[in-house]
Amino acid sequence: MDLENFFTDIHKYLRLLEETIILTLDEYGIKGTRSEGETGVWLDVGTPFARKICAMGVRASRWVTMHGFAFNINADLGYFDNIIPCGIRGKGVTSLHVELGRNIDEIEVKKKILKHFAKLFEANFS
């Protein structure tokens, strides 16, 4: 994504990506939030049950971004048992299907993400 077409502010870009996921989670009745100093989207921040549902990693060169976010939808969380996710100890990882107790239609989630992304970035994808 060429940020020169929107704004040249990586911090703003990351916060809008987070907000995109927060708004998407809200459509599923889940309250996603930010955790100060830890980029991404979290659930139950400030409790012993804090867990990350969306990680973010962005690289930019000349305001063109690469990478983005990893929103755990139907992820096999067993792989996280072998690593320290995002280098953060003492916090868990979750996914949308774990939180809702059912498999999630990924196409539906993508449509919701795109809707919120377009609104927040004032972009038209048609």
Image (cartoon, rainbow, N blue to C red):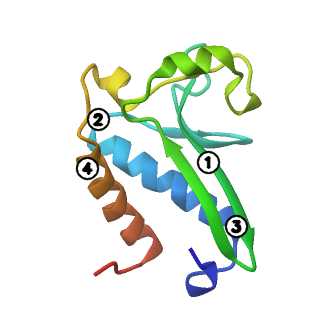
* Distance between the alpha carbons at the discs numbered 4 and 2: 18 Å
Look at mark 3 in the image and give the residue it sits on.
10
* Distance between the alpha carbons at the discs numbered 1 and 3: 12 Å
* Distance between the alpha carbons at the discs numbered 4 and 3: 28 Å
Q: Is residue 56 above or below residue 72?
A: below
* Distance between the alpha carbons at the discs numbered 1 and 4: 20 Å
Residue 47 visible in the displayed image? no
Look at label 1 and name its amino acid. Answer: Met
Look at mark 4 in the image and give the residue it sits on.
107
* Distance between the alpha carbons at the discs numbered 3 and 2: 29 Å
Residue at 46% across, 38% down: 32
Mark 1 or 4, nearer chain start: 1
Mark 3 or 2, nearer chain start: 3
Mark 4 or 3, nearer chain start: 3
Q: Nearer the viewer, mark 1 or mark 2?
A: 1
Look at label 3 and name its amino acid. Answer: Ile
Q: Secondary structure at mark 3?
A: helix
Which quadrant of the rendered structure holds the N terminus? Answer: bottom right
Name the one closer to the observer, 97 or 80: 80
Residue 10, x across and y down, in percent: 70, 67
Residue 70, x across and y down, in percent: 52, 44
Look at mark 1 in the image and give the residue it sits on.
56
Q: Nearer the viewer, mark 1 or mark 4?
A: 4
Look at mark 2 in the image and give the residue it sits on.
29
Q: Secondary structure at mark 2?
A: loop
Name the one closer to the observer, 44 or 18: 18
Task: Kindly indicate whether the residue at mark 4 contacts the one at mark 1 (C-beta within 8 angstroms).
Answer: no
Task: Kindly indicate whether the residue at mark 3 contacts the one at mark 1 (C-beta within 8 angstroms).
Answer: no
Left or right of 60 on screen, residue 21: left
Look at label 4 and name its amino acid. Answer: Ile
Left or right of 123 on screen, residue 63: right
Residue at 52% across, 16% down: 78
